[in-house]
Amino acid sequence: MNHIGKIDAYAGDACWALSRNACIYILEYLRTNPKVEAYFRNTFTPDEVLFHTVLGNSPFLARFKRSLLYTDWPLSLHNHPAVLNYEHLRFFEAKNKVEIQDEWGCGEVLFARKLSDDQLDLVDRLDEMIVRKGNGRPISLPKANK
């Protein structure tokens, strides 16, 4: 990465959960290091590299955790995630908490990727399972500010 100085490269999911302080750090870092932003502007999948690299070379590295996103990456699909199906649903239903162990460590996953509009019955079943596991209480989301 000699194009952007002596920093280590990091990569990962394009879906993350970041603290406010991490977001402020990224913005300030990019403001004071315009070559880094310019370099990543023309790279393949910058959302899977830029933020990880900035935070990976910061004090936030010690706070990195595994992704909260469940994604099935079968080798047969060559770099594309599988569309979730009823086999995945059975896997989710068999567990009280959906925890996985992979190359990123062990942990609970709270979100899932990739669902199809052609299988809305599966999405409904997933919603029903979430309510059931929440002891019959639907998950309440905060109201959006208008």
Image (cartoon, helix red, strand yellow):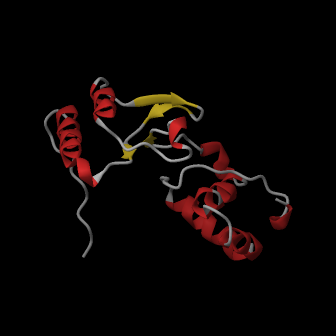
Up the image or down, 41 lies above or below 133; here it is below
Which quadrant of the rendered structure holds the C terminus? bottom left
Name the one closer to the observer, 106 or 80. Answer: 80
Name the one closer to the observer, 44 or 26. Answer: 44
Q: How many marks?
A: 0
For the point 80% across and 56% down, the residue is 7
For the point 55% across and 60% down, the residue is 21
Up the image or down, 146 lies above or below 107; here it is below
Q: Quadrant of residue 30?
A: bottom right
**Residue furthest front in the image:** 76
For the point 26% across and 54% down, the residue is 117
For the point 73% across and 54% down, the residue is 57
Picture coordinates of residue 23, whole percent (x, y): 55, 63
Horizontal arrangement in the rendering, residue 55 relative to residue 20 (left or right) = right
Name the one closer to the observer, 16 or 45. Answer: 45
Picture coordinates of residue 95, whole percent (x, y): 32, 24
Horizontal arrangement in the rendering, residue 35 relative to residue 119 (left or right) = right
**Residue furthest left in the image:** 136
Up the image or down, 76 lies above or below 9; here it is above
Horizontal arrangement in the rendering, residue 18 relative to residue 109 (left or right) = right
**Residue furthest top in the image:** 94
Q: Quadrant of residue 53?
A: bottom right
Which quadrant of the rendered structure holds the N terminus? bottom right
